[in-house]
Image (spheres, rainbow, N blue to C red):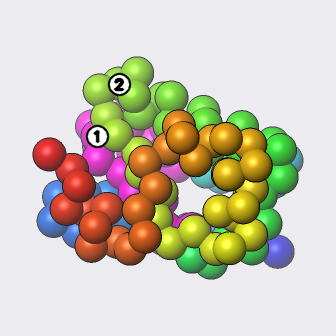
Amino acid sequence: MSLTMKTREVSGVTVLDLSGKITLGEGGKTLRDEVRMLLAKGVRKMVLNLAEVSYIDSSGLGELVSAYTAAKNQGGELKLVNLTHRVRDLLVITKLVTVFDVKDDEAAAVASFA
């Protein structure tokens, strides 16, 4: 199953609902292209909803870090929300949970933007 995403706006924050796998190849490229396109359009507040993401490989982790870095470099913020148990464990093991701003639910993530 490849990665699919839907983009929506909640209180001035762009939410990307991701579903599937973020892996080497198409999944990572899909995420990269979407984040870069949103940044080019001037979007600076993004939340990645990972509730439906079943798997992330090392390349997928790299794409998440790349998206986070691209947003930061352009004065934006990118937050993660609704991590599955498997994805949360992966971020804890790799210590990336200390890099990303991770929220438990979408309302908290949207409210956390200044």
Q: Nearer the viewer, residue 109 or 17?
A: 109
Where's residue 77, x and y in %?
A: 34, 40
Q: Count the marks.
A: 2
Q: Residues within 10 Å of mark 2 (few under 14, many from 20)?
A: few
Q: Nearer the viewer, residue 31 or 90?
A: 90
Residue type of the residue flagged with mark 1 = Arg
Place residue 32 in its image quadrant: top right
Assign the C terminus to one quadrant of the image: top left
Task: Using the numbered discs, state the Cα–Cα distance from disc 2 to disc 1 in whole angstroms.
Answer: 8 Å
Residue type of the residue flagged with mark 2 = Gln
Q: Is residue 16 left or right of residue 108?
A: right
Label 1: which residue?
Answer: 44
The magenta segment is 32-50
Looking at the rendered structure, the secondary structure element under dot 1 is: loop
- Residue at the image position 25 percent from the left and 62 percent from the top: 110
The correct choice, above or below, for 102 with respect to 11 in the image is: above
Where's residue 1, x and y in %?
A: 82, 74
Q: Is residue 46 magenta?
A: yes
Label 2: which residue?
Answer: 74
